Image (cartoon, rainbow, N blue to C red):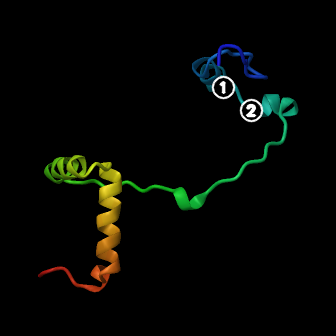
């Protein structure tokens, strides 16, 4: 970002832009802004769940042996369990 500067802060790096805005209020610069359009794909939202360390290490080993990422393997396994009706079964007492 060294060639392109932020239009309001005139900063040449993301760090400097952050420093600029951490000390200022957008309301003071509102007349210098322009409308922006963008799309958000909600389907790609990720949720993170804690996983036991030992399970995580084992998952990583298996994923490497299969040549896939741990995220891919975990998602495949969860999807497989859910499609088997796993969600309808009660946990052992």
Q: Which residue is mark 1?
A: 21
Quadrant in which the N terminus is drawn: top right
Query: For the residue labelled by badge 1, is the local secondary structure a helix, a strand or a loop?
Result: helix
Closest to the observer, 44 or 25: 44
At 24% from the left edge and 54% from the top edge, which residue is drawn?
Answer: 51
Closest to the observer, 55 or 66: 66
Q: Looking at the picture, how far across and down is residue 75, in whole percent? A: 35, 61
Q: Looking at the picture, how far across and down is residue 61, in whole percent? A: 18, 47
Labelled disc at residue 26: 2
Task: Kindly check if marks 1 and 2 are in contact, taking CB atoms under 8 A apart as contact.
Answer: yes
Label 1 and label 2: CA atoms lie apart by: 8 Å
Left or right: 40 in relation to 55: right
Labelled disc at residue 55: none
Q: Looking at the picture, how far across and down is residue 29, in whole percent? A: 81, 28
Q: Residues within 10 Å of mark 2 (few under 14, many from 20)?
A: few
Query: For the residue labelled by badge 2, is the local secondary structure a helix, a strand or a loop?
Result: helix
Task: From this view, report whether residue 45 is shown above or below residue 78.
Answer: above
At 51% from the left edge and 56% from the top edge, which residue is drawn?
Answer: 45
- Closer to the chain start, of discs 1 and 2, is 1
At 65% from the left edge and 54% from the top edge, which residue is drawn?
Answer: 40
């Amino acid at each position: 970002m060294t060639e392109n500067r932020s239009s309001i802060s005139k900063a040449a790096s993301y760090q400097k832009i952050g420093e600029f805005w951490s000390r200022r209020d957008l309301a003071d610069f509102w007349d210098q802004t322009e409308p922006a359009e963008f799309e958000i794909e909600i389907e790609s939202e990720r949720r993170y769940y804690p996983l036991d360390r030992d399970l995580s290490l084992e998952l990583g080993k298996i994923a490497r042996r299969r040549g896939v990422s741990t995220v891919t393997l975990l998602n495949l396994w969860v999807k497989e369990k859910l499609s088997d009706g796993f969600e309808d079964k009660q946990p052992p007492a």
